[in-house]
Amino acid sequence: MGEVPERAGPEEPRPDVMRVLRHQRHAFLNDLQIISGWLQLRRPEKAQEYIETVKRKQAQLGELFGLANREMLVLLLEWTYGPERGEIDAAWQVESDLAEAGPELVSWVGRSLDQAAGQLGTSDGERRLEGRFSERPDAYVVRLDCPASGTRWEREFPRRQNGEA
């Protein structure tokens, strides 16, 4: 009888992921409190409006979980749900899983998001950021928009082939 290979233990979650997930859980519990409050005030129409907002947030979270690139997933989760982001409304359109993206893509997105946060931090208006991740056969296309300022960051990144670094 053959030996059963030893199974690798589960990978430990990164501390930044755990912090973001704790914050996201806290935000969700706050959402439930708001819905409960509207219902206690006998304002079911307001509760229903807020439920739609929560559904949009959860759908956005589902969009992010379509990413196969773990570094990008962590970056966008932290950026979207991290407590330091305050009232910035981030919307992501994920049309590619970025599975073959190199580290330069994640680095560029991180730097661009920091620039956007700087702009939004000084804005008195809408604090919204929109991002789109798409692909062509040879490249990934990343676009970030700050509608309030009209600023756009856009760049293409070659896809890695056969495990290239």
Image (cartoon, rainbow, N blue to C red):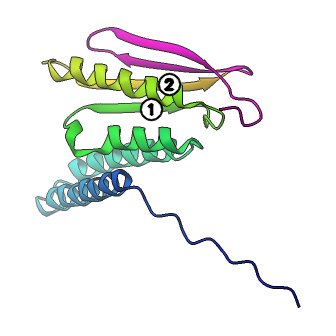
Write the start and end of the magenta stretch as one range: 136-165
Give the residue displayed 24% in from the left and 58% down from the top. 26
* Magenta-span inclusion, residue 125: no
Residue found at the far right of this picture: 1
Front in this rendered view, residue 80 or 37: 80
Marks 1 and 2 in Cβ contact (< 8 Å):
yes
- Residue 27 falls left or right of residue 132: left
The kind of residue tagged 1 is: Trp
* Magenta-span inclusion, residue 150: yes
The kind of residue tagged 2 is: Arg
Give the residue displayed 43% in from the left and 44% down from the top. 74
Residue found at the far top of this picture: 150
**On-image quarter of the C terminus:** top right
Local crowd size for mark 2, using a 10 Å CA cut-off: few (<14), some (14–19), many (≥20): some
Mark number for residue 92?
1
Front in this rendered view, residue 140 or 95: 140
Give the residue displayed 69% in from the left and 78% down from the top. 6
The part of the image, by quadrant, that contains residue 117 is: top left
**On-image quarter of the N terminus:** bottom right
- Residue 20 falls left or right of residue 139: left
The residue at which mark 2 appears reads as 132
Count of labels in the image: 2
Q: CA distance from mark 1 to mark 2?
A: 6 Å
Give the residue displayed 74% in from the left and 22% down from the top. 137
- Residue 147 falls left or right of residue 133: left
Q: Earlier in the sequence, mark 1 or mark 2?
A: 1
Establish if 12 lies above or below 57. Answer: below
Establish if 49 lies above or below 137. Answer: below
Residue found at the far bottom of this picture: 1
